[in-house]
Each structure stands twice: as structure tokens, then as C-alpha cells.
Amino acid sequence: MRNKRIQILFALLVVALLIVACSPAQPAATTAVKATDAVAEVPTDKPAPAEKVQVRWFVGLGAGSDEGTFAPQKAFVEEYNASQDEIELMLEIVDNDVAYDTLSTQIAAGNAPDIVGPIGVRGRDSFKGAWLDLAPLIAENNYDLSDYDPALVKFYLIQEQGQLGIPFGIFPSFILYNQDLFEEAGLNLPPAKYGEKYVMPDGSEVEWNMDTLRDVGMMLTFDSNGNDAKTDGFDSTKITQFGFMNQFTDPRGIGTFFGSGSLVADDGKTAQIPDAWNAAWKWTYDGYWKDWFIPNGAYGGADFLQGPGGPFSSGNLAMIHIHTWYVAPWALGEVKFDWNLAATPSYNGTVTSKMHADTFCIPKGSKDPKSAFKVLTYMLSKEHATSLLSIYGGMPARLSLQGDYFASYTETNFPDKDDINWDVAVAGMAFADNPNHESWMPSFQETTDKYNEFWNKWSNTAGLDIDAEFEQLRVALQAIFDAALA
Amino acid sequence: MTQEPVAAPAPGHRRLSRKVQRVLATSLITGLTLLILFFYLVPMVYGMFTAVKTDGQFSKTGAPIWPASEATFNYQGEDYEIYLVPIEGQIKSMALIKKGRASSTFIDPADEAAGPVEWAGSWRSLERSWEFDPQWENFPDAWNTINYPNLLKNTILYAVITTFGSVVSAALVAFGFARFRIPRKNVLFILMMSTVILPGAVTLIPTYFFWLKLDLVGTWWPLIIPAFFSWGTNVFLLRQFFLTIPRELDEAAMMDGANPLRIFVSVILPQSTSALTAVALFHFFYAWNDFFNPMIYLAGHPEKFPITIGLTAFNNLYAASINMIQAASLVSAVIPVLIFFFAQRAFMQGVVITGVEK
Amino acid sequence: MSLTSKLHALRPQKKFKTKISSLQKKEALWGLFFLTPWIIGFIGLYFFPMVASFVFSLLEFNPTVPDQAAYIGFDNWRRALFEDPEVGLSFLRTIRFSAISLPIGLAFALFLAVLLNSKNVLGSQLYRTLFYMPSMIPLVATVLIWNGVLNEQTGWINIIIQNLTGIQAVGSTGLRWLADPQLVYLAYTMFGLWGVGPAMIIFLAGLQGVPTELYEAAEIDGASWFQRLGKITLPMITPVILYQLILNVIGSLQYFLAPFVLNRGTGFPEGMTRFYMVYFFKQSFTFQNMGYGATLAWIMFIVGIILTVILFGTAKYWVFYAAEDKE
């Protein structure tokens, strides 16, 4: 009796050990090779199923992971699947917080999606080297690029990597202001057109530049006693309304507000801080701690600046510099004040209005790039691009679609508002930043990390020797560049 | 070792003082607990208040900490906020109809006919009039926005199945480690702990690769299967408890002819209910709140998502609906809290008397 | 009968030391039988990824371009151990933070467990649930709550402190919990204390295992509450304390989730919260240096194993098992 039980036990153990011994032996022995070969071997890995080719579309690196966009994106996919019977498009929406890790795990393990996007410059450069050069597919399919501004097509032609995208949506920038706060303060509205002057309360006309913006911003910054930042007795510990901020951007975006530039010199290896950026950063640092019209780190997290679309939508911030993607229901749909778009101010006589541009990329690891390209051309086509763009709030890159885009966009998203000054957004494209504020740097992520660390300190610490800080940052960046290029 | 009190009071007196002592001790200790609990739960209360606030209250300066909305008055078809205005020597509730820097225009809701009144001073220095106004509908709204029933079903299934698997497997393995002479047992044990010590993030890619090759990415299996092969922390915890059960109990059972499996089921398990409950609860809550693994393995299969992923719908790239996140989180915590409340009976002192009766 | 002799009576008496090898073999087989789930799981699920991660540490490996991975020998190891100052710095930060948070966290959990195990607390079931409740709130919500209550301008903690003590706590000149390098570890410790639930429950479960008979005997002997705590309760739950200690040491080494969700791993303020694992995570996933990241993980792994073995080694001097483990 007991013997038998032991025998059974023994048999079980042997079976267990056998399973154990056989199954993992292969992968364990060839781990590295397998992991690295994964991408190369997958195309032949799975024979195409008899029915439909599956194409996976990964969303989450930029727009498209907000709750309100789920349903329309799904509808778009369903419409595509119903429109033909060769390809089954599958949507993978991943929360932005974990989208980068998820995508990098998928790519590394050889399970790359077929289409990734919408994706901006930042998302693209975070996965440098992972994207397919579309040029051969464009040539093979005789894909017509004449409906795009050639400069914009070139924007996606990246050195040593190829044509990584076809233009899809562009997002020019502008000043967005809270009209109610201007009226209450008895101030004139900022210029609706480039080249217009600003009329100060005393009737004098001044150029719409950074000095004017600061002055107006200070007149729109109030403490809880109702004093503005220009008044004696203004209490900087009890601010309840701010004048201006560069919302949802980073130090490179703030620098570009004053002029285009790059942290890496033309030689591609020397760290630098462009003069315009130096001025912009100083202007902002003073705005945090001396002129008080820009919310610093301490105020940034305060409840009274938490609106559904961040600080501006709280109603306690008079002006921001932002892109067209912000003019969307998620940010401005529920606000109880009137707002509009105005010109970006000039610095030293020049206007720089930074630009965002989104597209879709095909990873090199895609199992079926040809089918992916088919889907891509459908998404970018004249007939269907508009419906995607209205989900993400972008202006069409196709010249032929730009005409009525804003009219139909306003009608869909802001039916009650007929005075949105879209013209100034379109006009801003003439002042787009070049080089783009999100463009390549050596060790992209590490560099980003480093300057953000410095910026965090500046926005949270008063009384710094800011020139010395800039120099420290430059040295730190140089060290990163040197290590990257060694 | 301990000394008797030198002069023992009379027995009756002593009993009385014992009673007094007991009441005193009870109220003192209960009071202390409540005090700690009060501070401990401050953030929780903040979360609860947040859950029933309006979207707008966050950005209103001078807003009270409790859920409230500003009192308004409808004047000529528009709603205006009511402020407390010092006017004519008294504080009046007045609706602010036109904001100005130096002076603003108000109207008295009680006396609309009197027409607009100009008040000199900064309206910013005035207090708003607030009304207690909890937004209970945030809970049903949260529920409806994110397809709760389906998420809940997935979460419960996942949590229940993996909890069962992890408790059974951990108990078996822990018994093996606690009671048997096995060659190189210490090495095996450290090997087991090594799976806990090496961060999961570094094995993520090969693990994902493994499941991908088995064609199981996109299913629940990569999340469920590991639970049935015992986790180091659970095994370690149960081993510690099994080691506190005196061996005489097994030996007695062995004398009666019980085999180890029988001893495990009829001696060890009944003696460890509190530890087993603890492991079961931990695992259940872990599975309930697991976010990263389901996201990685279930990407693209929203019909299989658990609640945690559903919650991210409120967490937008740039802005978050803070009140809705809190509301949805509280809703998702209801079931774990109830389970805990009923399961914790296992931790009542004196229910299980371990070991000493023979 | 003294307490110590009572305790001694609980220890197993080694009655027979018969050495029959077949019996031993049988015992070992039974033991292996019970270990089967783990053995299968280890070899099937953990072994290959662990080996793979070690292989990563010998590669220059960017996960987004896996086809470009290259073998570079022990370069990553050399860089981590001798060239990269951030490794040592971030490790020191981890130690400094653990030195504050680990003892406080353990003591608080034990204190709560003893308190809530007391017969003198009315409604202890409810309190246990309430103390555990924060551990059940999903992380997204917890993070928002703490960012809210710790906010220097509008956070409740500063408002309460200011009202209770009169200290100027609110405002940009007040207590800036998450921005002040002096305060940030304390703030993170508070955040950690909020997750005390599981540790409290483990201690509670341990307290259940203390035979009530011992307390009765001690009470008859007239031992005070503190004497009972020191002479019975604590020694009897040493197995659980050992468990908590080891798991908390490992947890401290792996500490990263809180800083990662509170400030996205920026190390704010002044790099104070760039702990070792945060640095590991940045290298592996943000900077895409999976090879170097794996090296960092393996260094931590080795440190963790050494600490675990040491703690286990000390166990025989202070941990009391009623059924002594036998090798």
C-alpha cells in the first residue's frame, strides 16, 4: 500500500523533472541569440492565415489614450475592417504612463506592432532606430506626395534612418488667453494678427514682444487682496491668479519661445545654450521668483490651478502659449469663461512659434510592412485623414484638406463658439521653429532627463545664481554628449 | 522573578480596582487607537471628499475643504456667484454680476428690484458663499464611463483563481521546506528567495518572450499560471508559521499511521488558518490592484482588462479628472474592503489556540 | 514554573536519533514531492528569464533595436562598479532612506498589530479594516491623494500642522514636503506608512500563534504588560519578525515605485529620490540601456542575496521556532 504510493509519487516526480528538463532547455541555451534574432526571424515565423492578415495599431505615445478618444478610434477601425476583406486592423490603446515600457518590451521580444501613432518627434526619437524607412514602400506603391508641403515631407526624412513618416497632422502654436480676465482687469486683448501693436491701458501703442507680455502678465497676476504684481504691497505668498505660462512644454520648448535653437551645436557634439534660450530661461526664472507672473513649482501643484485641461482651464491663468491640440473639448469644452487665440510675441523683432507634427510610423519589426503600409495610406488618405484628425485635434498636413478643416472642426467640437481666431494659428506656421524644439540630441533621453532635473530645481528654488546654473547644465550636457559619442 | 505586591489589598477591594483598571485601560487604549486612526485616515478623508467634489471646486480659490459648490443666483437668465459683501455696516450675500478691479457690481438676491449696486473694493478680498453639495452622482458616473461590470467580472475571476493557486501551491512548498530533511535544502531555499530578490523589471523582456513563444500573449494565462507554481514571499511566510507549530503534533499523528499528506491536511493547515488567510488576502489584493502585468500581456484586448486598466481612462496624458479617479477607485475598493472585514475574523485572538494542548 | 522554562517546554525534545538511510531517503522524497510546484515553476518560469537577464548584462543591448545587440564582455560591470559615480550615490541614497523608513515602518506595523490585538480595544475589527483600507486603493488614486495632502499651498497636512502648532507651514516658505531635500524622506516615509496594512496583518497572524496558555501563566505570575511583551510576545513572533525584516530589506533595495509615480523618476528634489532602483529603471527603460540596466539589477541582486544569507545566519541566535528546522 505505502510502497505503491511512493511509486506513484516517484513517477510523478520523474514526469515533472522531465517536463522541466526538456521545455526550457532550448531557450535557456540560446537566450541572447534568440532574443536578438527574434526580429529577423519573425516574418517567416507565422505563415499568413488563410483568411485575413492581422495588422496591429499601437496607440499611446502621444494623443489617443484619453477616454474620450477610445470610441471614435474604435469606430474608425471597425469602418476600415468593414471596408475590405484582406486585412484585419487591431487597435491596441495603452495608457501613456506605461506605453513606452510596453512598446519597448513588445519590440525587444519580437512582437512589434505594425503601426504606431499618432507619434510626435519626441516619441519617435525615444525609439531611435526602431522605425522602418518608408521610401521603398512609397516608391513601390507610387504613393503621391504632391499634396504636401515638400518641407514637411522632408521633416520626416531623418539622416541615416530614412523617410520615417508621411505628414499627417500639424499643430501650430499661439497665445491662448482668457478674455474674462482681461476685461475684468480693464486691459486690451492681445493682438489677433501678427504685426499688430498692443495698446497699453494708458493708450500708448507698443510692440507685442516679450517685454510687453511680461508687463501685461504682471497686470493680470493678483494676490488675494486684489493687488496685481505691478502694485506696491503685492503679496507674493498669496497669489490667486497668474498672468502667463508656457503650458505643457519643457525647457527646450520654453527656450524656443524666444528663438529656435538646439542644445547641441552644428558639429553635433558640442553642448551649448543658445542666446535666445538663455534669455528665455532668465525671463522665465524672473517670472517665477521676481515678477511673479508665471506659476513656479510651488504654485504649479496648487489646487486653484488644476483644471480639466491643466492650469489654463482652471480659469485662474490669463495667458498660455500652446498648440492647436489644446483647443479641444477635453481642455476647453467645460470652461466657463470666454477665450481666444492671439499672436505669439516677438523677441528682438523676430517671432518664433514652435510647431508640433504628428504622424504614424511602421516599426522595423512589423511582420507585414506591406499590409501595414496599406493601412497607413488608408489612414492618411484624403477621404479618411480628416476623421482621424478630428479625434486628435490636428490640422491636416494635406494642403487640399486645410481649407475647410477649421470650419468643420469648430462645428463638431465647439458648436456654440463662432469667433475662434484660427487665422492666427495658420499664420503662425510661417514662424515655425527650425530646428524643431523636439529634435535630435545625442543620448536623447539622458539629455532630456538632465535638463529637466535642472529645470525642476530652478522652478522650485528662489535666489539662484542663474548664469552659474546655466553653465553647470552646459557642462553636464557636454559630459553626456562626450560619453554618447565616445 | 516577579514579586508579589508587599501589601495585598483585601480581595473585594482588589476585584473592584481590577474592574476600574480594566475600564480605564479600555478607554485609554481605545482612545489612543482612535487618535492614531484619525491622523492615519486624514488622506483617506481627503480622497473621499475629492471623490464627491464638482469638477470646478478644485480651481476655486478660497474653496472650503469639504465638497461644496458656490452659491449662485440667477439674474436675467445668467447664473452669478454669491459673495459675502460688507455693505451698509453689515455682511450681505450678494451676487457678483460684473467684476472690476477697483469696484464691482452686485445685486442683492433678496431684493432684486433694488437693482445693481456698485461696491468699491476688490472682489478678490471677499469670501464666496458656499453650499455643502456632495456630488454623489460621481460614483454612478464613474461606473458608467468605464464598463464596470465587465472589468469587475475579469478582476474577480483573475483574483479568485490566482489566489486559490497561490495559497495551495505556497502551502505545499512551505510544508516541504518546514518539515523535511532534504539535501541542500538551504541552497534551494535561497534559490527560491532569489526569484524575489531579482527585480521583475529585468526579467520582463525574456518572460514576455517566453509567453510569446507559447503564443499566450493576449490571454490571461501569463498572469494565472505563475500563481500555481508558488511565489517565494508566500512560501517564506508560510514556512515561518509552520515552523512555529510544535512537531509533537505531527509525531503524534504519525504514530497513528498518518502519512505526510494527511498530516499536512489535518494537522498543519488547521493550525495555520490565520497565516493562510493572510496569504490569501495579500494575493487577492495584489491581483485586484495589479496593473502593469495585465497591461503588458493584455494590450489590445480591452474585453479582458481588469479594473485597474479601466481606471486609467480617467488619467489623461495632460490632465486628469481627479474627482472621477477617486470615485472610481473607491468603488473598486468596496469589494476588497468587505472581503477583508469578514476575513479578518481569522485574526481574533483566542480563536485558534496553537499547539499546547496534548 | 518560570516563563523561560515554560518556553523551553515548547521546544521539541529530540527523542530518537535513529539513522536509517532508507527512512531518510523516504523523507527526502516526500519533501521533494511537496516542493514539486516550486521546482517546476522555478525551472519553467524563472530560470530562463534569470539566465537571460544575466546574459543581457554582458551585452550592449537597446531593446528597441534588438538586432543590434552586441557582446561586450564585462564592460557593463566595470562601468557600474568602477566608473559610474551615480551607482554609488544612488545606492547611498537607498541606504539613507531605508535607515529612516525601514525601522519606522516595521515598528509602526508591530505597534499597530499589538494594539489591535489587545482585548482592551473596542471595535478592533473595524479599526483593522480601516488601517488596511489605504492598501486597497489603486495606486493612481493613492498618488493623487498624497500629492494633494502634501501640497505646500493647499495640502491638508500643512493646514493641520499650522492650526495645531501655530508653525508657519502653509505656503512656499512653509513645509515643502516633496520639494525640500530635508523633508522629502520623511514625506516618503509617511507615504510608505500608509501601506502598513499587510505588515500589520502578518504581525497579527503571528500574534495569534502565541499560545494563550503562556499569557495565563504569566498573568498568574503577576508579570506586567511590558514583561509579557518582552518575555513572551516578542520571542514567540520572532519567526515573523525575521520574515518581515528580510522582506523589508529586499523591499528597500527594490524601492522605486513611490518616487517613480510621485515625480516620474526625476530624482526631485536635487536628486534625493533617485534611488538605486530608480536609476536602474531609467537606464533600462528610459535610456534604453537594457544591458547596463541588467548589470545594475544583478549587482543589487548579489547584494540582496548576501544580506538575506546574513540575516538567515543570524536567525539561530534570536529566532525561536517551536518546531526547530532540521537540515
Image: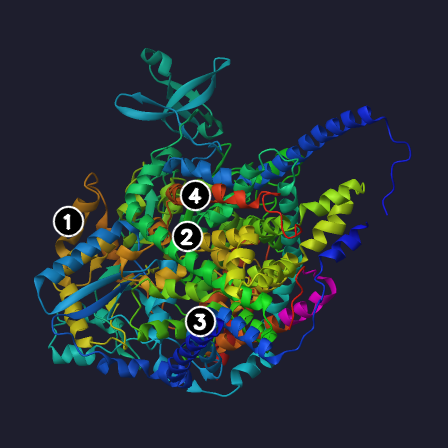
Picture coordinates of residue A380, whole percent (x, y):
16, 65
Residue drawn at (41%, 52%), measured in percent from left and top?
Answer: B288
Badge 3 and badge 4 in a common chain: no
A234 left or right of C324? left
- Chain where mark 1 sits: A
Which quadrant holds the C terminus of chain C?
A: bottom right
Q: Which residue is mark 1?
A: A408
Picture coordinates of residue A193, whole percent (x, y):
26, 50
Q: Amino acid at mark 2?
A: Trp
Q: Which residue is mark 2?
A: B288
Q: Which residue is mark 3?
A: C41
Q: Amino acid at mark 3?
A: Gly
Q: Amino acid at mark 1?
A: Ser
Measure the C-alpha gap from mark 4 to mark 1: 31 Å
Measure the C-alpha gap from mark 3 to mark 4: 51 Å
Task: Indicate the secondary structure of the residue bearing disc 1.
Answer: helix
Q: Which residues are magenta?
A: C307-321
Q: Which residue is mark 4?
A: A305
C237 left or right of C274? right
Is there CB contact under 8 Å for labels 2 and 3?
A: no
Task: Indicate the secondary structure of the residue bearing disc 4.
Answer: helix
Q: Residues within 10 Å of mark 4 (few under 14, many from 20)?
A: many
Residue A210 covered by magenta stretch: no
**Which residue is situated farthest in the left direction here?**
A84
Residue C311 covered by magenta stretch: yes
Residue drawn at (21%, 77%), measured in percent from left and top?
Answer: A134
Measure the C-alpha gap from mark 1 to mark 2: 44 Å
1 or 2: mark nearer the eye: 2
